[in-house]
Image (cartoon, grey):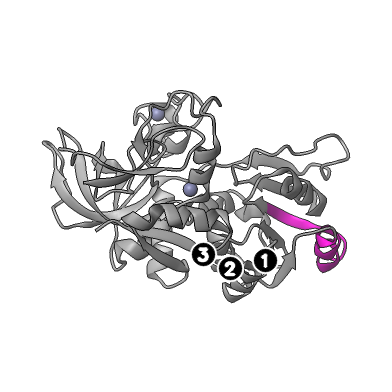
Amino acid sequence: MKAYQLTKWQAEGEAREVPVPEPQAGQVLVKIGGAGACHSDLHFFESDGKNPFMASWHLPFTLGHENAGWVEKIGLGVAGLRPGDPVIVYCTWGCGACRNCRADLEQYCEKAAVMTEGAGIGHDGGLAEYLLVPAARFLLPLEGLHPRDAAPLADAGLTPYHAIKCSLDLLKPGSTAVIIGAGGLGQMAIQIVKALTPARVIAVDSAEQKLQAATQFGADAAVRSGDESAKQIRDLTDGKGAEVVLDIVGVDATLKLAAEVARPLGRLTVVGVGLGTLPFNFIQIPLQCSVSTTYYGTKNELLEVVALANAGKLRAEIEFFTLDQAGEAYRRLRRGAIRGRAVIIPT
Ligand SMILES: [Zn+2]
Ligand SMILES: [Zn+2]
């Protein structure tokens, strides 16, 4: 079968011919209906592979951590799944046995060196005709949604969903959430805040077309990033700043903006893996504003994300590509020329 793989560091991915995997006991082979191309894959292309997260990865592996499709074949001992079942793939594959995995926090598996690996994250992912999934618990039912439309939910939906669930206590009537980055994840984040809370949403991006998309997806205000953006956001919040700031980009400039627009007792969550540095001292962060990262979400949260999409309250604007066009999809993503999400349909 054809697969789009990361074959060397500091290079784009490459289309290669690889064998179709055979599911062993406990494993499931999924026929991919759609696989999202994510901005974090671009970080993989740029990396020299030496950071602590990627140091344990073995190349080549197939990219694609946003996957949905149909059960093709099940290994011995797999119960509850039948060939043809539509499924979405939970992409962070923990050990299943440590305390965090038992608490449905496999994205924070205690056996992981830094971050939990999984489909398209150091292991073969879904930019191929078939994906071998190591355990049935990583497959969640997809009722009512086509896999090609559901694929982005696995990361672009789940990651902001988890971050927002962690801040629900602060998102009350009269509260404001600032969402920095209005691409695929940001557009989902806007809809999730609107579906789950009464808070107002201010979206920030450098691209006019993404600000337009943000408004279409329900943002109450859209602010172009630049020298004036911190002042504009503070003006929109009566000079007080926002209770919740999600930085979906995570580079130096967006982290600085995030710190400038959060309010005392607020929460600043870094979702984007831009690996920028947040200026931090007693006065650069609002008083008692907590700062954290988040990484993906839980399996139960992915079920909730699917339910939200099924209820018509969460959708991605998707451009579809064939597997042969995967390189082009990533190049357009890098240029900022994908307004929402790019999804590859391998067959
Ligand atoms: Zn991603
Ligand atoms: Zn674990």
**Quadrant placement of the C terminus:** bottom left
The earlier-in-sequence mark between 3 and 1 is 1
Measure the C-alpha gap from mark 3 to mark 1: 18 Å
346 versus 299 height, above or below: below
- Residue 87 seen in the current view: no
Q: Residue extending furthest left? A: 76
Residue 41: % across, % down: 48, 44
Position of 14 with respect to 341 (left or right) is left
Tell me, yes or no, whether the two marked residues, 1 and 2, touch with CB atoms within 8 Å.
yes
The earlier-in-sequence mark between 1 and 2 is 2
Q: Which residue is mark 2?
A: 194
Neighbours of disc 3 within 10 Å: few (<14), some (14-19), many (20+): many
The residue sitting at 40% across, 46% down in the picture is 65
Q: Amino acid at mark 3?
A: Gly
Q: Quadrant of residue 293?
A: top right
Q: Which residue is mark 1?
A: 201
Residue situated in front as seen by the camera: 269 or 146: 146
Q: Amino acid at mark 1?
A: Val
Position of 238 with respect to 192 (left or right) is right
**Label 3 element class:** loop
The residue sitting at 12% across, 36% down in the picture is 77
The earlier-in-sequence mark between 3 and 2 is 2
Residue 115: % across, % down: 49, 32
Q: Nearer the viewer, mark 3 or mark 2?
A: 3
Q: Which residue is mark 3?
A: 340
Give the extent of the magenta segment: 228-245
Neighbours of disc 1 within 10 Å: few (<14), some (14-19), many (20+): many
Residue situated in front as seen by the camera: 253 or 197: 253
147 versus 118 height, above or below: below
